[in-house]
Image: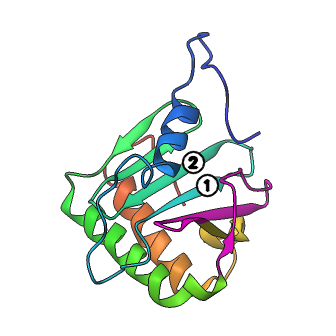
Amino acid sequence: MLRKAKTSDGIPNPYEGLRARALAAVDEGLAPPGPDHPHVWGVVIDLPTKDRAGYTVVALGDGTTNLHMSGGQTVTASDDEASVAAAKVLLVTVEQEALHQLVEETGKLPRPDRARYHVLSPDGLRGMDVPRDQVWGEKEGGGKVVAATQDLLRALRRLSTDAPSD
């Protein structure tokens, strides 16, 4: 399972709530994006690992950049120039390269062998799945969207030892 309802000490895990808030950002009043990516207001990416832990990367058009870990930790990178720039590149890349591939979706978690891109727009949630191994760099492929995701993950890794490694 990608998420845990409670941490090891019995305290409710904030992961599920943070992930849900990110998926509902447009409904909660996220400001419209600029002209570089007018149809992509944000991207929320669920990244399972082989050991069934999980990470959720959040990149919103307002500069919000977070990495939520199913163990309860969060890396907030909204004040880190490199992470915010990498997030913007991801949003632009999704707009230019993947918009035509997206299907309507509900925000559910992916299968353990897949990474799911949830794309936020004023028209609702749209998404696509890619092999998890491509996003983690264990397998070639995935194109420009996966490359932009990997760049964002590298930027987030600089900020925290809790961030996932290659």
Badge 1 density bin: few <14, some 14–19, many ≥20, Cα 10 Å: many
Q: Image point 66% across, 83% down: which residue? A: 140
Q: Amino acid at mark 2?
A: Tyr
Disc ID at residue 55: 2
Image coordinates of residue 11 in percent, x first then y, are 56, 12
Q: Image point 29% across, 50% down: which residue? A: 77
Magenta segment: 102-125
| Side (left or right) of 152 relative to 78 | right
The reply to whether the C-beta atoms of the residues labelled 2 and 1 are less than 8 Å apart is yes
Q: Quadrant of the N terminus?
A: top right
On whether residue 12 falls in the magenta region, the answer is no
Image coordinates of residue 105 in percent, x first then y, are 69, 62
Colour scheme of the rendered structure: rainbow
| Side (left or right) of 105 relative to 32 | right
The residue at which mark 1 appears reads as: 46
Q: Mark 2 and mark 1: span between their CA atoms? A: 6 Å
